[in-house]
Amino acid sequence: MEWQRAFHLTRQHLQAGGEMPTEPGVVVHRGEDLGRWVRAQRLGWEKLTGAQQWLCEHVLGIKPATDGEKPRPRRTQADKWALNLAAATQYYQREGHLRVPRKHVETIVVGDGKGGSGQGQEERQIRLGAWIGNQRSRAATLSPERVEQLSTIGMRWT
């Protein structure tokens, strides 16, 4: 019902000569933020039913967002752990220890997971010294798996 209401309000706005609302907060009609709704349809295109996609595209002229327009997916805690562990591994392989100065920042290259030609890779700055110090202070609350992962690459806990 909410989707249908926003669809009809957007259609009425366009039929009255209004322009396609593309930014949240610019066009509010009968309490509905049409720009926010249009953006949500574009970004969540794959979640719409076939009929909703057809109505958006053929009645309103809304197209799905391109990959460049979509926000990057949020990193999970597991993703963040993996990045920090990769930085710690790289540091250990280069230096032979994990006595990392507190202010040390490690640069690692991460890919998009699609393999291939090296496109989609970027450098990340990891505040490794602070992270290592935090892991040492949290040793009692870390999962056994995480303690083992760090111990395997040379972590000294004291």
Image (cartoon, helix red, strand yellow):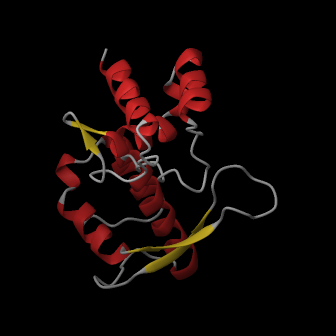
Q: Nearer the viewer, residue 111 or 49?
A: 49
Does 116 sit left or right of 19 as displayed?
right
Q: Is residue 141 above or below residue 68?
A: above
Does 135 sit left or right of 43 as displayed?
left
Q: Residue 9 is drawn in which quadrant?
A: top left
Question: Image quadrant for the C terminus?
Answer: bottom left
Which residue ends up furthest to the front in the rendered image? Answer: 16
Q: Residue 11 is drawn in which quadrant?
A: top left
| Residue 75: x %, y % from top left | 41, 50
Q: Is residue 102 above or below residue 53?
A: below
Residue at image point 40% right, 81% down: 105
| Residue 139: x %, y % from top left | 22, 55
Does 118 sit left or right of 2 as displayed?
right
Residue at image point 37% right, 53% down: 23
Question: Image quadrant for the N terminus?
Answer: top left
Q: Is residue 92 above or below residue 150?
A: below
Q: Nearer the viewer, residue 158 or 55?
A: 55
Q: Is residue 122 above or below residue 21?
A: below
Residue at image point 60% right, 31% down: 57
Q: Nearer the viewer, residue 93 or 29?
A: 29
| Residue 81: x %, y % from top left | 39, 54
Q: Nearer the viewer, residue 114 or 15?
A: 15
| Residue 53: x %, y % from top left | 57, 25
